[in-house]
Amino acid sequence: MADTTLDQSMAEATPLRFSTRAAITHAVLILGALIVLLPFYTMLSLSLKAPHEIMQQTGGFLGSQELFRDDFCIKLGNAVQDCMVNPIIYNYATAFEKAPLLRYLLNGLIVTVSIFVIQVIVALPCAYALAKLRFWGREAVFALVLFCLLIPVHAIALPLYIMLAKVGLTNTYAALIIPWTISVFGIFLMRQFFMTVPDDLIDAARMDGMSEYAIIWQVMLPTAIPALMAFGIFSVVAHWNDYFWPRIVITGNRDLFTPPLGLREFKGDADGDNFGPMMATACIIVTPLIVCFLLAQRRFIEGITLSGMK
Amino acid sequence: MSQISLRTITKSFGETPVLNNVSLDIEEGEFVTLVGPSGCGKSTFLRILAGLEAADAGQVEIQGRDVTAIRPADRNLAMVFQSYALYPHLSVAQNIMTPLRMRDLNRLGRLPVIGPLLSRAAHRKMRDQVGEVAETLQITPLLDRKPGQLSGGQRQRVALGRAMVRQPVAFLMDEPLSNLDAALRVHMRAELSELHRRLQATFVYVTHDQAEALTMSDRMAVMMHGDILQVGPPNDIYRNPASLDVARFIGSPRINTLPGEVNGTGGLELLGVTTETRVRGLRQAVTMGVRPEHLHMRVTGRFSGTVRHRENLGSDIFVHLEVAGAPAKVVLRLAPAEAVELGLGTRVAFDFNPTDILLFDATGARLAFTHPAREVA
Ligand SMILES: Nc1ncnc2c1ncn2[C@@H]1O[C@H](COP(=O)(O)OP(=O)(O)OP(=O)(O)O)[C@@H](O)[C@H]1O
Ligand SMILES: [Mg+2]
């Protein structure tokens, strides 16, 4: 009886009460969100504006959206009135015209998906063995995994590059994919998750006649979906956005460019930096990720809380 | 020849010995219970039988075949786990079907979508078998649910179904009822016994709850500290325990124990009373055990104590007496009518029938005794 009245009064009071603590928390969070969003704001804004508005920093967020004269078009010998263009159309059309952006997006897709799939194929059995099988030296192997987590990719980039160059794999998809197929982070994350799977479940599967590999793919994989989603997002985001490694191993062949490499096309041209189309490209590149994030938002947050990486 | 036999099984985890030379034979169709206090090695023993754990030494034979080195799946045993261990991502029907899929289908037939198309007959047969099992366990309406949407009792049944569907040599159960509430546990006890009668299959059941062991088993094996102390039908073990440890473990409330002494002439002295019980042997300290139901309130009783606590179970009342010279309270089982006017602090005289007592020597082993015929009121 006393409990229910207490509950009711709490339920009624909560929306009315002003809490300084909550207010401060929210103020800090809003500030943080603004700082994080500012570059995106600039990126989107610049992709909508005409070059002179970008240079003079006028026009607010949207720009005036007046037609302007495309100098490159005039250089090609067209009449002035044919070369008046809308800034949005100009920026986005140039992004697609000047570089094979669709090709880059496709490359990005091929590379990130291949990396993720192979990472899973490698990491799940490793994690299963480290979490659930008893064998000599297991702790040492796990310590090695933890140790490998500490190695920054840049430290091993040069030897990796040399190795790939020696076997003649530079400028191939393989060069983009192979170095990332063994993810110690993935092994670690999945191992931590598998530790929480009850041993009885695995023993039950053994009694039912499953082999160890069948247990991995038919029992552990389905129960590990939330953890895999989290890992998948980390992996895909990291490799979709990676500029460093593709820049090293893809040296001439534009057909193999990943989206971040595509951004370079607008940098350091003879006729100066062309920020509008460049930002339009950036917008196009981040859109798939943002869409994926919005679709998988809840899973993503679950995954981060799960891995304790807040 | 027995259906399952375990011979001189020894197992230790690191330095800790868990099983010391344990042997057990199980006949076909028997309901055998392994009972013992927590941590005595029951689960380990069962897991060695199942093949989930390897013994350090000893053999496991099933139907005359040495299976010591054979993997669990090929021993044709089924196991029900304490946590039920249902596959959380599969429906109840798929859970029950899993052992059939793994046994009856080849790699191709197990593929998700084309599997059922390729081996249509096998799949139809499997679905029928699942349907039958579900019918037996009355879980047909639950077949499409996921384990997460079931109550504890329902999960228990699904776990049983997954074990039954394959018609294994024996069912192994590791405390399958311990996650259920008290009422459901009693109900499932009856259901398991019923199931055993109907299936005529061998059941090996592990529990630390002696009530489960007493009510369900044909034979029970009492385990303690990694040894099987006594094997036999529940009644024999209850009436005729081989040692003080067994006597103390089986029976609730616990058997009353009183310190005693065998005097120079072989007479048993208890709390200063010389009884007519004769023990052959030397003068020695002994322990007498007597069950609460064998103590009677009697005005002429030779022993007496003060009521310190009453436990009313409705049908019975357990009265706890403080008796001078006894290290622990002495418990009497009384009918409610007898116990009406026994308030706390009342002095009560009690006695026992000399044939109802058990005597143990200082090491806890049973002592034989004789007694001249005495009239019992
Ligand atoms: N994997 C293991 N590693 C180390 N020690 C273990 C392991 N499994 C069990 N033990 C130890 O072996 C002993 C027996 O364990 P077991 O699980 O067989 O007990 P039990 O009789 O089933 O107890 P309970 O009734 O609590 O389930 C315990 O002391 C336990 O600590
Ligand atoms: Mg146990």
Image: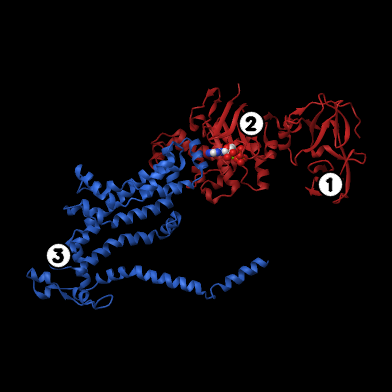
In the rendered image, what is the letter of the chain coloured red?
B
Q: Nearer the viewer, mark 2 or mark 3?
A: 2
Q: Which mark is residue A269?
A: 3
Give the labeled residue for mark 2. Answer: B227
Q: Is residue B129 visible?
A: yes
Earlier residue among tags 1 and 2: 2
Disc 1 marks which amino acid? Pro
- Disc 3 element: loop
Residue A258: name its quadrant.
bottom left
Classify mark 2: residues with Cα within 10 Å, few (<14), some (14-19) or many (20+).
many
What's the residue at 39%, 69% (across, down)?
A32
Q: Is residue B103 left or right of residue B339?
A: left
State whether residue B316 is above or below residue A27.
above
In the rendered image, what is the letter of the chain coloured blue?
A
Q: Which mark is residue B336?
A: 1
Q: Between marks 1 and 2, how big is the CA–CA gap?
A: 40 Å
Report the number of numbered marks. Answer: 3
- Disc 2 element: strand
Residue B357, position as x, y percentages in the image: 81, 32
Disc 2 marks which amino acid? Asp
Labels 1 and 2 positioned on one and the same chain: yes
> Quadrant location of the N terminus of chain B?
top right
Q: Which one is in front, B153 or B73?
A: B73
Q: Between marks 3 and 1, how big is the CA–CA gap?
A: 102 Å
Q: Nearer the viewer, mark 1 or mark 2?
A: 2
Classify mark 1: residues with Cα within 10 Å, few (<14), some (14-19) or many (20+).
some
Q: Are marks 2 and 3 in contact (CB under 8 Å)?
A: no
Q: Which mark is residue B351?
A: none
Residue B120: name its quadrant.
top left
Residue B178, position as x, y percentages in the image: 62, 44
